[in-house]
Each structure stands twice: as structure tokens, then as C-alpha cells.
Amino acid sequence: MKGRKLLMIPGPIEFEPKVLQALATPTDSHVSPNFINTFGNSIELMRKVWQSPKGQPFIMAGSGTLAMDMAVVNLIEPNDNVLVISTGYFGERYADICKRYEANVTILTTKVGDTVSLNDIEKELSTKNYKLLTITHVDTSTGVLVNPQPIAKLAKKYNTLSVLDGVCSVAGEEIKQDEWELDVVFTASQKAIGVPPGLALLVASEKAIETFKNRKTPVSNYYADFTNWLPIMNSYEKRQASYFGTPPVNLIAALEVSLQHIVNEGINNRIVRHKKIATAFREAMFALSLKILPISIDISANTLTATFFPENINGNDFLSEISKNDIILAGGLLPSHKTQYFRVGHMGSVNTNDIIATIAAVENSLSKNGYSFETGIGVKTALKILGS
Ligand code: PMP
């Protein structure tokens, strides 16, 4: 017995042992040659993972919400128009953040489980001059996947900056930041990038940096201000000592290990692995006659799946039975549907054993909670896909 439960929530996830070992090494000075090199390497590796050779990476102590903050506070000024394309809870959060920075915010949304049509986005962009738009690549509350590429193209057409919340997608879903001309793409360490919680990771395009440099008013958030951090990122990349705020030395050591691991696996291989595991899990749920939140497979995330409980099954009972099988899953997050579904994270180091164990635990819990189905049908369906 391992003495611990398998963490299958949509972040934090299970981490590679060598990433955890990096966290447990003695802490270097933040200006030691060893750490300067680790920081510089991590910046360079981020460009590879984001597929953004021209982008400017930022590595910050903080969670994904700090990255959301940073992306907009550095680029917008009071009364700028911002378009938030929302597919759930984190889109709503983005609108709140932009309002806090005194933007004029318009939210485009649609029914739960669907994406906003390109037509509607273009119609809105043509009504006024939008400085910036935000896209949630995968909304972790619904498991809905948005295709950012055509939206970034539209943003470009209307001279609007595009910001991609990739907290639940970077290193798990396909992103080509430079080719798709996305201006900012960010994530948080605890998701598919594979490092324990505590890092906000962001890459800004040349155009985003130029927009920041041309602003007329000061950035209205001291900690998040690029003015403070851009010279630090540049110094570390040149392998020079620098200080503004003490960096999280051990987390960045772990980041370097994880980014290198991702690059060694190969971004494309990693995306294919995520797709296969996600397909296996979803098809297993369908074989059990369960329904998922996204209205179609084309817009279902490969990093997590949100599945409705069958009727008459109490969510808490279902999840506590799963926990008895030493697996932790997450409940719902979207306020309107919170008690009606559960979420399984399948990103980062997730492997075939993890997903099969999870499906088996789902079957076991369904059975204990009185749901009738052909025992083993979910596992059998997944195995067929995973073995193909
Ligand atoms: N955006 C998305 C899509 C997320 O999934 C999350 C976290 N689940 C956040 C933003 C916020 O990140 P954090 O919890 O690390 O602040």
C-alpha cells in the first residue's frame, strides 16, 4: 500500500518524483550562479513549451489568478474596452478582474457546455474599438475546450490584443502562441505543466510588450507591474544576478526539471497522449450511460472531464465512495450546476494505469450507490481505446 491516494482532480495533479526531488534540495541563494542558470534555462524552456520563440516569459511567485491579473493590468488602462469570452466560472472571474482595473467590460457567453460562436465574437468586435479580448482555453468548471486560433485571428483583424487563459491547457492542449498570434498565454504550475502550486507563468508577445511600453498611465498593481519584472527576466536570461522580489527558488528548480521533461517527451507526443487518455475516459463514461457537460466531443477538453451524476445519485455519497478506493476526484464548480456533476483531471503525468483505476473506482461507486449497468463496461471500453 502506497499510503496515499491518487490525486485525479483538475489541479493540483500527481507530480513526477524528480520534480518533487528538486523541491526537496537545499535552497540556493537567489543570486547564486547555480540558481541564475536554473532561472535562465526555465525562461528558455518556456518559449519551447509555449511554441513562442519570440515571446517574453515571466516566472512569478503566485497562482493562476495572479497571471490573469498580470495579463490585463499591464495592457489595459482605465476605460479601455475589454471583451471577455466566457465558457464558465473562470470567464466570469476574468470579467471581475477587468472591471477592478476600470475597463469597460462586455461578456459574451452562451448556454452551459457550449462555446461562443465566431460569428457572435466578430459581430461584437465590429461594434466598437476593443483594446483586448480574453479567451479561457479550457474552463475548468465545465471542461469546455475553446479553439483559440480563429479567435486570435479575428482579434488581429480588429486590432485587439488576445489573451489566452491557458491555466488548464498549457502543456496539455495544442497551443502555438507565435503562429496563432496570441498576445499573452499564461498558466499556473499545478496543472499540466507539472509543478506543485505556487508559480504564475506567462508569455507576452512582442506586440504585448510594445503596448505595455506605450501606456500613458502607470500600471495600477504594484506587484504585477511588468516595469518591475521585465528587467529581472532579462537579467536572469543573460545569466546575471538581479533582484526585485525574492523568487521561489525551489519551485523554479522544480519548474526547470518539469519543463525539460516536457520538452524531452515532445510537445506533440504529449498532446497526443492527453487526447488518447481523455478519449478513453469520455468513452468509458458514455459506455456507462453517463453524460458530460460539454455539448459535443469536439469541444471537450483533453485535460479534464466534467460528468453529470446519474439521476438519484447523491454527489457527496458518490465521491466519498471513490475516496474509499484511494482516488480523489473533484465535485462541481459552476454555481448553477455545482451539485450535479463531478470532475476528473487527466493531465500532466497521467498514465493508462491512473485512468483505468479511476474508471474502475467510478464503476465501483456507481454500483455501491445503486446505479445499474454492465459491470466492467467502462473499463473495457477505455482499454480498447488505450490499447489501439
Ligand atoms: N483559470 C483557469 C482556467 C483555472 O482552471 C484556474 C484554476 N483552477 C484559474 C484560472 C485560477 O488559477 P489559481 O487557482 O491557480 O489562482
Image (cartoon, helix red, strand yellow):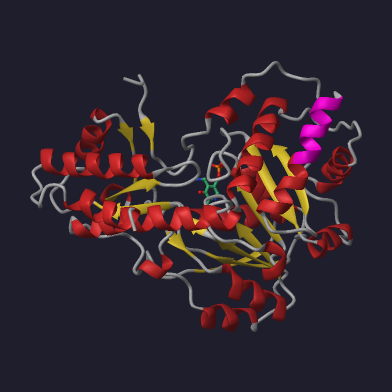
330 in relation to 296, above or below? above
**Does residue 36 belong to the magenta stretch?**
yes
Can residue 142 be seen in the rendering of this structure? no
Q: Nearer the viewer, residue 224 or 246?
A: 246
Quarter of the picture containing the N terminus is: top left
Image position, residue 35 (x, y; %): 79, 28
Going by the picture, which residue comes out furthest to the top? 26
Residue at 62% across, 38% down? 258
219 in relation to 1, above or below? below
Can residue 97 be seen in the rendering of this structure? yes
Residue at 59% across, 81% down? 122
Image position, residue 94 (x, y; %): 58, 55
Q: Nearer the viewer, residue 207 or 38?
A: 38
Q: How many marks?
A: 0
Residue at 19% across, 44% down? 363
Lateral position of residue 225 relative to residue 117, left or right: right
Lateral position of residue 118 relative to residue 321, left or right: right
Image position, residue 322 (x, y; %): 25, 35
Q: Quadrant of residue 76?
A: bottom right
Q: Quadrant of residue 98?
A: bottom right
Quarter of the picture containing the C terminus is: bottom left
Q: Nearer the viewer, residue 379 or 168?
A: 379
| Chief SS of the magenta region | helix
**Does residue 283 belong to the magenta stretch?**
no
Q: Quadrant of residue 88?
A: bottom left
Image position, residue 47 (x, y; %): 73, 52
245 in relation to 333, above or below? above
- Region in magenta: 33-41
Residue at 62% across, 52% down? 97
